[in-house]
Image (spheres, rainbow, N blue to C red):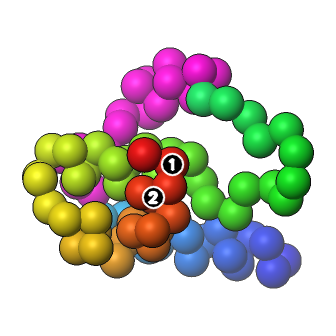
Amino acid sequence: MLLADNMMNLQKKWKKRYASNLSDGAWRYLKPHLPVSAVGRPRELSMRQVVNAILYVLKTGCQWRQLPREFPVWSSVYSYF
């Protein structure tokens, strides 16, 4: 039940949409092309959230540190960039 609660909270957090967010169709196309983490810890971040954050920075021109709170921490997103 705890996992279900966490997923509900995450969905509520991501209710806010940005024009830079990937559509479901675009995500289905892109997802297979992203590398899978083969060693080490499993990823704690959603790669879709990371990609959306990168697209937000590219579209708006904002500084990494100015990412809205709906996105993962800027330093984590930047490390994937």
* Image coordinates for residue 46, horizontal then vertical, percent: 59, 54
Q: Is residue 43 above or below residue 10?
A: above
Tag 1 near tag 2, CB within 8 Å: yes
Mark 2 secondary-structure assignment: helix
In percent of the image, x 87 and y 54: which residue is there?
A: 40
Q: Which residue is mark 2?
A: 77
Mark 1 secondary-structure assignment: helix
User: Can the viewer see residue 28?
Assistant: no
Residue range corresponding to the magenta coloring: 17-33
* Image coordinates for residue 62, horizontal then vertical, percent: 14, 61
In percent of the image, x 41 and y 25: which residue is there?
A: 26
Label 2 amino acid?
A: Val
Q: Which residue is mark 1?
A: 80
Q: Is residue 38 above or below residue 71?
A: above
User: Can the viewer see residue 75?
Assistant: yes
| Mark-to-mark CA distance, 1 and 2 | 5 Å
Question: In which image quadrant can residue 58 be found?
Answer: top left
Q: Nearer the viewer, residue 60 or 12?
A: 60
For the image, the number of numbered tags is: 2
In percent of the image, x 15 and y 44: which residue is there?
A: 59
Q: Nearer the viewer, residue 52 or 11?
A: 52
